[in-house]
Image (spheres, grey):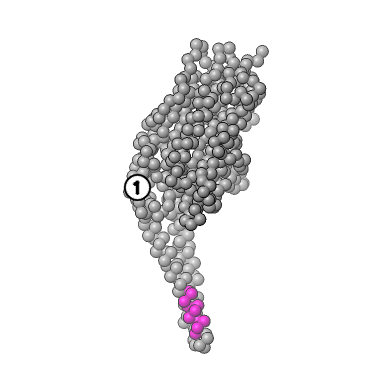
Amino acid sequence: MLDIKFIVENPKIVKDSLKKRYKEDRIWMVDELIKDYDSLKSLKKQIDDTRSQRNKLSQEINQLKKEKKDVSKQLKQASEIPEKLKALEEDLDLLNEQIHKKIIQIPNILHKSVPKGKDETKNPEVKKVGKPKKFAFELANHEDLAEQLKIADFDAGRIVSGQGFNYIFGQLAQLDNALQRYGVDFLIKKGFTLVVPPLMLNKKYLSGTVNLGDFKEVIYKVENEDLYLIGTAENPLIALMANKTLNKKELPIKLCAVTPCFRKEIGAHGVDTKGLFRMHQFNKVEQVVFANPHDSFKELETLQKITEEFFKSLDIPFRVIEICSGDLGDKQAKQYDVEAWFPRQKSYKEVTSASNCTDYQARKLNIKYTDGKEKEYVHILNNTMVATSRAMVAILENFQQKDGSVKIPKALHKYLNFKEIKPKK
């Protein structure tokens, strides 16, 4: 979330950012927050004055008692203060609650370089890498191909768990594992520390990384527990640093994790009736960076280059797009997506996202850094290294052979005891 002082002192910047995001319907909140801030200062002053009055009366009563004088008037005044103070503090709590409800609906300030556009159709292409292969035969879709190769059972997953869940086994399961291991090794060489995080978070810490109001239809809640299944390792990796003050000299702190991710994926996209592309459960290697604010946008470019290097090493053609203002999530100040080429669908589709959320999440979770003197909020970045399900679809489509076999990208050979998935005889 934004700092209320920043909103009060820079209303034009906040309103201009809202306009660029096509969220003019939230501009009224900025004006309301300015009024609330004045009320907040007034209430705090009344509370401070009341406490000061209580202390003065206490001293006066003690002095009068020493002098053996009448203190009935002062005692009456003192007896009225607790009730008055309680009422003021209740008003303050209520006002803080009202401010919080509004302030979490004000999106992060867009970086000046973010292109203006209303929706995903306006996301500009930054570059294309790799040349899509031409096939002299008709490609099978990945669902049929996987079942023909006997490396997946999509029907069984739906029967035992419901739509959006699958069984994969044999060489496809090994490929999933190889992508995870390669992704982790790739990041460790780039200076990341591997973390095994919890797969569930309570509401307080999950809501520090996402706006639960916006994601209630996406996140799985554990019944009768204050716990939610994570939709990405970004959530527990960021929560790890909650209420901590980091040493400026140690920044950037680079963490990675490989976890299952759980998402209901209800909404405009829905869930594919069959296959691996969009599922309720999938494996993902994720990156999170805690950075010095002065370096965070430089770190974003570094994160993006890591992803590009990874997919280039897999020989999967892809393009990079920059997310426009109207398509950008509330927490992001700037974002790139990598879209891999899916030849069966003859289109580029998202496989990774790299974002700089600046101090938006850090304020919610009170994550700061210090040089030994001043304390400031860190900037937090995240990036998908690889969501293995989509990478496997890209491999099944891009490396498919006429005889129904699938070659494995060379970068993964050292993690596997085979170089090709062949049809079973």
Closest to the observer: 289 or 372?
Answer: 372
- Residue under the image location 62 percent in, 29 percent down: 177
Q: Residue at x 54, y 19 (%)?
A: 399
The outermost residue toward the front is: 249
Magenta stretch?
A: 54-64
Q: Please, what secondary structure does the residue beneath circle 1 have? A: helix
Badge 1: residue crowd in 10 Å (few <14, some 14–19, many ≥20): some
Q: In the figure, is residue 276 to the left or right of 47?
A: right
For mark 1, what is the residue?
13
Label 1 amino acid?
Ile
Q: Is residue 15 magenta?
A: no
Q: Which of the 4 image quadrants contains residue 407?
A: top right
Q: Residue at x 62, y 19 (%)?
A: 419
Q: Please give the name of the residue rendered at 48% of the width and 19% of the height, measured from the top-left corner.
A: 343
Name which quarter of the figure residue 123 lies in: top left
Query: The C terminus lies in which quarter of the figure?
Result: top right
Q: Position of residue 291 (x, y in %)?
A: 49, 45
Question: Residue 309 appears at what percent x and percent y?
Answer: 50, 29
Is residue 7 at least partly visible in the picture?
Answer: yes
Give the main secondary structure, helix, strand or loop, of the magenta stretch.
helix
Farthest bottom residue? 68
Percent from the top left, x then y, of residue 296? 45, 43
In the visual, does 229 lie left or right of 354?
right
- The answer to whether residue 341 is above or below residue 50 is above
